[in-house]
Image (tube, helix red, strand yellow):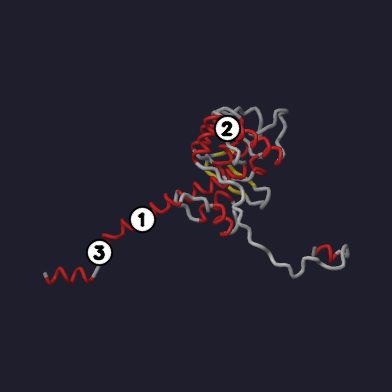
Amino acid sequence: MGFAVDMDIIQRNPLTGLKGFKSSSEGFHTWTEEEIAAFENRHPIGSKARLAMTLMLCTGQRRSDAVRMGWQHVKDGLITVRQQKTQATLAIPLHPDLRVVLDQTPRANLIFLLTEYSKPFTTNGFGNWLRARCDEAGLPACSSHGLRKACARRLAEAGCSNQEIKAITGHETEAEVTRYTKAADQKKLAQHAMGKLIDIEPQQQSANPSEKVRNSNG
């Protein structure tokens, strides 16, 4: 609206003075491990659906980037992605699961994912196509974007720092990463944190001055 005022398209900005609002929505559903397993059971290795799901889950990229990935981007155990949205270039190590799926993928075309007419997917077309594959697996809440969030969740549950997660997903801000990793398994993270506490407690006790005093008085 401010741009429209500057261009003399409108006389005043009707949004001036309006306040933003908080949304309680968490956005796209983050795939759970059970949902990932259900999709894999329905779409075996060798299928285009399995390739699409694994490619997004193991690289953490947007669908706009997934539709452009191909064999020319794979070299020396890395898959290199130039993100369409940010123009950032990422070199992502190939996850073993992705290696297995790519080993069963023909090299007849440079691009991994093609339509039934052997043409590259559009971003929206790919999203709709994968949405239908989710329905086939009985996963009505799942979508292509949720796989990017699932990748971030897995990285968070593995104990990766925000900087490490950003190196994979290409997020630019801490707030973005925090939003994407919100679905990290609380129970698993709590167990990891408690394990750290338990490991350090013997060291704290041996360095406790009051404990040493009691031992010397005994």
Label 2: which secondary element = loop
Label 3: which secondary element = helix
Residue 142 location in percent, x, y?
59, 41
Query: In whole angstroms, how far apart are the C-alphas of marks 1 and 3?
Result: 17 Å
Q: Which residue is mark 3?
A: 205
For image coordinates 66% across by 63% down, the residue present is 21
Label 1: which secondary element = helix
Looking at the picture, which amino acid does disc 2 mark? Answer: Ala
Q: Quadrant of residue 176?
A: bottom right
Q: Which residue is mark 1?
A: 194
Looking at the picture, which amino acid does disc 1 mark? Answer: Met
Q: Horizontal placement of 3 versus 198: left or right? A: right
- Disc 1 crowd rating (10 Å Cα; few below 14, some 14-19, many 20+) is few
Q: Are marks 1 and 2 in contact (CB under 8 Å)?
A: no
Residue 168 location in percent, x, y?
55, 49
Looking at the picture, which amino acid does disc 3 mark? Answer: Gln
Q: Earlier in the sequence, mark 1 or mark 3?
A: 1
Q: Tell me, for residue 137, which label it has, or none.
A: 2
For image coordinates 65% across by 34% down, the residue present is 132
Q: Earlier in the sequence, mark 2 or mark 3?
A: 2
- Disc 2 crowd rating (10 Å Cα; few below 14, some 14-19, many 20+) is some
Q: Quick one: 90 or 209, which is closer to the camera?
A: 209
Query: In whole angstroms, how far apart are the C-alphas of marks 2 and 3?
Result: 53 Å
Instruction: Note whether 178 is above or below 128 in the view shown.
Output: below
